[in-house]
Image (cartoon, rainbow, N blue to C red):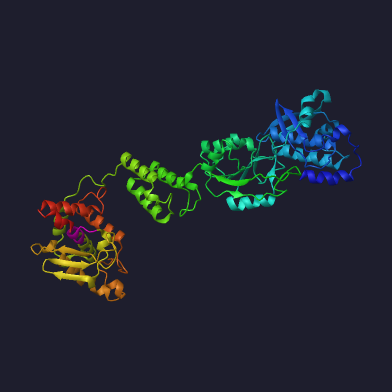
Amino acid sequence: MVEGQLRSLERKSSDHKVPRPSDRDRCFPERLRSVLHGSLHRGSMVKQGEEVHINCLELLAGAFAVKVSARNKIQMKIHLLMDDVSATHYINKMGGTKSPVLAKLALDLWSWCLEHKILLEAQHIPVVLSVRADHESRTFHHHNDWKLSPAVFNLVNQTLGPLQLDLFASRLSAQLPKFISWRPDPEAEAFDAFSQNWSKVRGYAFPPFALVGRCLRQVLAQEVPAVVLIAPVWKTQVWYPLLLDLCVATPLLLLSFPGLLSMQGQIHPPSDLQLPGWLVSANHTQRQINPLQTYFSAILEFLAFEYEAGKAYRILNVCRSAISMTHPKVDSLRVGEHPLIKQLLRGIFNSRPPLPRYSGTWDVQKASSYMASLGTNDLLTLKILSLKLGLLLALTSMERVSETVSHYLRYRRLTPDGVVFDLSELTKKSRFHQGPKASFHASSPDNPKLCVVDCLKEYEGGTEPLRAHSERSKANKLLLSYIRPHRPISSESLSRWLVSFLSSAGVDTTIFKAHSVRGAASSAAMSAGISLKDILS
């Protein structure tokens, strides 16, 4: 950068006079001050300990003032008022031969102006007319421009990052290539972080501690998804509970050592200050907490958040059961049995009671008439025969699709009244203390086109060649896919079979899905005079 070259080139140049003591006061960080169009522009030009000639500082200050004032403008003329004769001449003449440093600074300034199509003119004014700028150059306050040690910042970036934008920095204290300064700065992306949108980038905020509360309110107001905040553990501050509420990850406690904080070459004295890095977010779903062991308030917030998102009571009840099974006890009680959890779920049930999925049912006679119109089973294709058998099995037993696809040929028993399948796999209704469940499907000998046994026998004969080349476990599965390679179907496939067949039969499948077959079958059985005990069995 220019500052590094200034020191080396200045030692080679013997054309400059030794600065006066009053000038030396302005040769350190408190230098860049300019008054343009009534606004103050402040910023440090050089690092602590770097002595630069006053003429170089004046020219550099003018260049910074031009870049700050015209950073987003083109095709304009700037009239620059300066109280240094040498800097004025070097700008107007676009360089000079006396000082290589001044010549380079002037050429750099003019190169920037030409890129932005800016015409620059400098005018010398007496010192008595630049009292305000001179006063500002000697009263620069940078007591809050601290930054973390580079090694510590890299740890924060690797653990809580990657970070994209430094929200509170200056040209000399920025930890990232892109930064936002508090005052106008020629290299900053923007000025005043509180006037910018934080939700589009993953920001890094190390503000003055007096602004921590304002930063948290900014996160809430803009619904910022994530920002890394460096703030102390001050439990007595009014913003500390809000900080804990917005924190979505375990804070990264920074090791306290003499070089943890620095400012313009000065080291912050060691203290008992606990300074963690906090990952805060306005979205509680971004919290990186241990799902198997977390604080009780997070469980309550999770259930309340899911309720506000529109989840039904049955879904929240499943969540409560899952958390209760995996989470340690709270107050010597399981999570699902805690009074606060029970009270919350009771309120959710009362405010949003469960509703049945279907307010009515479809007519089974419509599907029966369609099956009868297809003709005898021996005339049907494998696809139609498969879909028909799936619907007949569902109508004659009122079982779930997961139970229907669990039927095996080796566990099939033909009886005078129908066919029985012993379920060898666990189903949704299986219980630890109960034995194997059996599924009975009644036959209809008076109507062969609607008889599940006749359809089953025809299906077994049609799929026998397909089972010959399959593994024994797969070959014993009752329902096979009618598409190559003819593997056993899943519950989802059977659901599609039922919906497809019902749609062909004229049932409105935009409303009624595969699970509606159970309700339609039980309603038809009740209308036919079958007892409720037989239906439930």
Look at 9% across and 64% down and name the residue there: 445
- Residue 424: image quadrant is bottom left
Residue 398 located within the stretch drawn in magenta: yes
Residue 94 located within the stretch drawn in magenta: no
Q: Which residue is nearer to you in this view: 25 or 271?
A: 271
Q: Residue furthest top?
A: 129
Q: Residue furthest front?
A: 332
Look at 43% across and 53% down and name the residue there: 329
Q: Position of residue 152 (x, y in %)?
A: 66, 51
Look at 36% across and 48% down and name the residue there: 316
Which range of residues does the magenta coloring cover?
Answer: 392-399
Quarter of the image that includes the C terminus: bottom left
Q: Position of residue 268 (x, y in %)?
A: 73, 43
Q: Which residue is nearer to you in this view: 333 or 299?
A: 333
Q: Say if 445 sits above or below 42 in the image.
A: below
Left or right placement of residue 357 versus residue 363 in this view: right
Q: How many marks?
A: 0
- Residue 378: image quadrant is bottom left
Left or right placement of residue 529 versus residue 195 in this view: left
Q: Position of residue 431 (x, y in %)?
A: 28, 61
Residue 111 visible in the snapshot = yes
Left or right placement of residue 345 versus residue 155 in this view: left
- Residue 457: image quadrant is bottom left
Q: Position of residue 374 (x, y in %)?
A: 16, 60
Q: Which residue is nearer to you in this view: 130 or 462?
A: 130
Tell me which secondary structure the magenta stretch mostly adopts: helix
Residue 281 visible in the snapshot = no
